[in-house]
Amino acid sequence: MKNRIALLPVDGRPVTRNLPMELAHLAGWQVVAPEVNDLGFLKQPACVKEIRAWLMEIASYVDGLVLSIDMLLYGGLVPSRIHVYQVDELIQRMGLLKELKETYPDITLMAFSSTMRISNNNINEEEKSYWEDYGMKLWALSYHSHRYEKLGEEQDGLLVEKLKKEIPEDILRDYRNTRQINFTVNKSLLDLVQEGVLDHLVFPQDDTSEFGWNVKEQEELQYIIRNRSLDRFVYLYPGADEVASTLLTRMVFQLEQEPLPSFYPVYSGEKGALVPAMYEDRPIAESVKGQLVAIGSRTEDDFQAADIIIGVNVPGQKQGDLALGLNLHQVDTNDRNVKEWIGRLHAYRKRKPVAVVDVAYANGADPAMVPLLLDQLEWKELFGFAAWNTAGNAIGTTVSQAALIWLADKKGKSSDEDRIKQLVLRMLDDYVYQSITRQKVRAELYKENAVQLNQVATPLYQKEVSRFLTKYASEWMVESIYYPWERTFEVGVNIRKEGLNEG
């Protein structure tokens, strides 16, 4: 065995490319991926021809491939929403998967292909240009038309007719056509599973809700999967950016022929565990189960039977969104008890490994919880921590961290330095940037209209990073700060331990 996996990510952002590579490294595996500059930039697609050549070249050097179908066919996740390709051309590109399996029959192929999202906003940064004017109306039409099909309520039917008149026919036709093309491609992927070309396939639901055309597509895919008895090989669940990490975790355990650890969830509030997360279609407790199934694991009802305790910080009443400033006063309420929860985790940690996932808010860590965790729990002993973007992103990251560290521990390959580095990185991104710095940056940029992002953001972020590291992780230092897509939403940060030279 080569102990090497190739990753074709959805794009070149740190969370979709670097993070999965770092997680596999925790268990002693090397992951190779295309260079960031070869993976496109926001709406600019990667060169599909070069991606295909890279895959054929690298396949002989690895034990397995984890592939983003969105990157392979469209040149990235965002380009998959705005492309102008026809089905025949995309199916032809998909033929590379058969070629790979025929050339390297022993290689393990795992792939993921997103169900095209429908954003409930008028922001076209990651969508077609007309989303600026009709995004929310397209979302509403999607939601209420599917709801009307399912429930038959008159109010939904009336809204559908009203919305159809408000959206230009050519725009609606174009959007529905793009959706249909992507959906046809996803159905074709099931043939490759049935033929044994793909060993495992995931359809992540990107930014979803209870109803919508995307949900309807998932229902149709699930029907086909069950009808063909493909449930063991194909999985649908809310997620997107974390899927490379969960699939890499699954592949590492499969290639090492090791059973996955089981998890015992501990929630900071009973009500919050049953609240649906924003941008997802199910309660947080079910999202935890879904991400565990994604890596091949499960929960336990008895903590003594579990291998890992996963502490899940939930909102009191409703999940907030720190990036958009939504539901901020419905999170830290009397419906949860964070102090008691941290006390329980402290007690559990004496007997079992503990990981923590923070989903009280979307898009950042809970500013009321994290200081307590840092001061009252031995946070550098954790087997994982994440709080970025959606609940699925954070949960998938945390269970992958914990499982791979557990495997390394079991095999005597664990590295405290690598584990702590991962925790510090997540704290600097999910907490220090997303929870503390980002809104300050946006406020300053609003005042200083023409100033470049890094001129405003970097000094503010460096100040907060320095404060955090001085107090909690003084042995680490920042090497570089960058903004992957030249916007405030995400940050990239590289760190190293004091006294260590690069490389």
Image (tube, grey):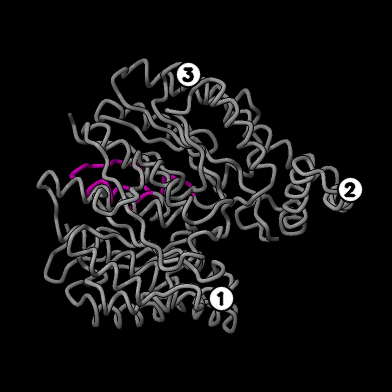
Q: Which mark is residue 92?
A: none
In primary-sequence order, the first of circles 3 and 1 is 3
Bin the neighbour count of mark 2 within 10 Å (Cα to Cα): few under 14, some 14-19, many 20 and up. few
Q: In the image, what residue type sits under mark 1? A: Leu
| Residue nearer the viewer, 8 or 45 | 8
User: What's drawn in magenta, residue-wise?
Assistant: 17-40
CA distance separating discs 1 and 2: 34 Å
In primary-sequence order, the first of circles 1 and 2 is 2
Label 2 sits on a secondary structure element that is helix
Residue 224 counted in the magenta span: no
Label 3 sits on a secondary structure element that is helix
**In this picture, is 439 found above or below 430?**
below
For the point 56% across and 24% down, the residue is 188
| Left or right of 281 on screen, residue 258 | left
For the point 48% across and 24% down, the residue is 230
In primary-sequence order, the first of circles 2 and 3 is 2
One can see residue 42 in this view = yes
**Residue 130: % across, % down:** 74, 53
**In this picture, is 408 found above or below 5?**
below
| Left or right of 480 on screen, residue 503 | left
Q: Which mark is residue 194?
A: 3
Q: In the image, what residue type sits under mark 3? A: Gln
Q: Which mark is residue 328?
A: 1
**In this picture, is 8 found above or below 335?**
above
> Which quadrant: the N terminus?
top left
Q: Which residue is mark 2?
A: 161
Bin the neighbour count of mark 1 within 10 Å (Cα to Cα): few under 14, some 14-19, many 20 and up. some
